[in-house]
Amino acid sequence: MSFQNITVIGAGTMGNGIAHVFAQYGFQVQLVDVQQAALDKALQTIGKNVERQVAKGVLSEADQKATLERIQTTTSIANGVAKADLVVEAATENKELKLKIFKEIDQSAPENCILASNTSSISITAIASATSRPNKVIGMHFMNPVPVMKLVEIINGYATDQTVTEQIVALSKQLNKVPCVVNDYPGFIANKILMPMINEAIYSLYEGIAGVEEIDTIMKLGMAHPMGPLQLADFIGLDVCLSILQVLYDGYGNTKYAPCPLLVNMVTAKKLGVKSGEGFYKYSPGSKELVVSERFK
């Protein structure tokens, strides 16, 4: 199958990054979101990120212009997927919402169109059950920031055709990504391993074993992690971390996945990390300095 027209559902951080990368590598992209304001913001973000790539010598000015011209936007899923060869859903990490979206995509997308989800933890098999083409549904889990991170975690649902998997692997390589194929179990591999580590770091803070900076410094300098687990949790979004841990806990029924009460409280208090301006650290626009939240000093 030859991919030309790509539709991305959701114009948030992941959606605009996925749209950016596909457009950069020559694909025609339809970016879909129910809110026009989200689409406008996404185009601004992509524009700034492409400018940054030009400044770094990654793209030429001609590439910059061509990349941006390949992205169209719409608030209609039906219109957005009408000519798609591949749809990549990157909406909020909510199972009911994803099932609703996939049912709508399935009704409007061409018969041969492959439907992919960027979900970080929700069952691809469950998502596929909302469609009439479960053999053409697959997980395509990009990492944030999408234009920079090399990995694409490809998740086979129970019914995913091998040929579909092979096509998505080849497509990921066209994007200069490194695809890794895994099977459909809660959290897949990336988050099945990552989230318990983040949760344990939060427990260590909650239990008073060490402070925010100490925990992150030990993991950075002792384990060669580029970012400490608490800073990474802020970057991912504490609400997203909580959602994934709940999926793991529900899916495996093992208390090792039970979210730390401190994480639950922080999400309830809307201290979500970078996107809310405060989590384990405080974030000021334009500042790269890490300042521990007053709550943890």
Image (tube, rainbow, N blue to C red):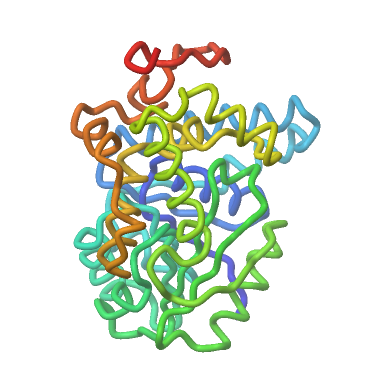
Nearer the observer, 35 or 163: 163
Q: Seen from this angle, which residue lies furthest right?
A: 57
Image quadrant for the C terminus? top left
How many numbered circles are shown? 0
The spot of residue 146 in percent (x, y) is 57, 46
Nearer the observer, 14 or 121: 121
The spot of residue 269 in percent (x, y) is 20, 27
Residue at x 38%, y 61% (from the top left corner)? 121
In the image, taking residue 255 as reference, residue 293 lies left or right, namely: right
Residue at x 39%, y 83% (from the top left corner)? 111
In the rendered image of this protein, does residue 78 appear above or below residue 242? below
Image-quadrant location for residue 102: bottom left
In the rendered image of this protein, does residue 132 appear above or below residue 261? below
In the rendered image of this protein, does residue 25 appear above or below residue 207? below
Image-quadrant location for residue 244: bottom left
Image quadrant for the N terminus? bottom right
Nearer the observer, 220 or 176: 220
The spot of residue 237 in percent (x, y) is 38, 37
Image-quadrant location for residue 84: bottom left
In the rendered image of this protein, does residue 17 appear above or below residue 50? below
Residue at x 36%, y 58% (from the top left corner)? 80
Residue at x 32%, y 70% (from the top left corner)? 252
Nearer the observer, 8 or 208: 208
